[in-house]
Amino acid sequence: MNQKVSSLVLTDAAKHKINALIKKENKPNLKLRIFVVGGGCAGLRYGFVFDEKIKEEDTVFENTLLIDWVSITYLRTATIDYKDDRFSIHNPSVRTGCPGCGLRV
């Protein structure tokens, strides 16, 4: 299942960092898997892990990202960036957030 990823944005900084990490691992089939899971102070949280296996229900975005069919519903309008030595997600579709840490999902 390869759903359309309407307005998901992967910044140049994020692309560069993902490609650098893949090159460092010397695994050309490696991709960054982004997912949304329950838990955390805002009810949901984002996760990042490198993965070589593309599952049938995954969406492959820009040949660099893997997003499962559940997570894609939360990430359709997100911007994925890399700055201050970490990946971050800005998601204008968020409905809740944590006033303490600022996490928004």
Image: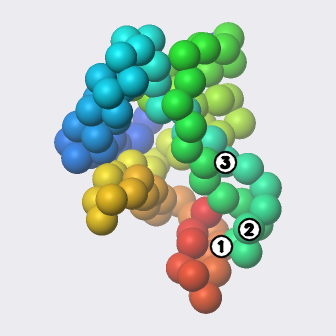
Residue 73 location, x and y as percent? 63, 41
Which image quarter: residue 49? top right
Q: CA distance from mark 2 to mark 3?
A: 11 Å
Q: Secondary structure at mark 1?
A: loop
The amino acid pointed to by label 3 is Val
- Give neighbour class at mark 2: few <14, some 14-19, many 20+ (Cα, 10 Å): few
Left or right of residue 69, residue 85 in this image = left
Residue indicated by mark 1: 96
Q: Residue at x 54, y 79 (%)?
A: 102
The amino acid pointed to by label 2 is Gly
Pair 1/2: label in front:
2
Residue 40 against residue 32 in the figure, above or below: below
Q: Quadrant of the N terminus?
A: top right
Residue indicated by mark 2: 40
Q: Residue at x 63, y 69 (%)?
A: 95
Q: CA distance from mark 1 to mark 2?
A: 12 Å
Residue 31 location, x and y as percent? 46, 24
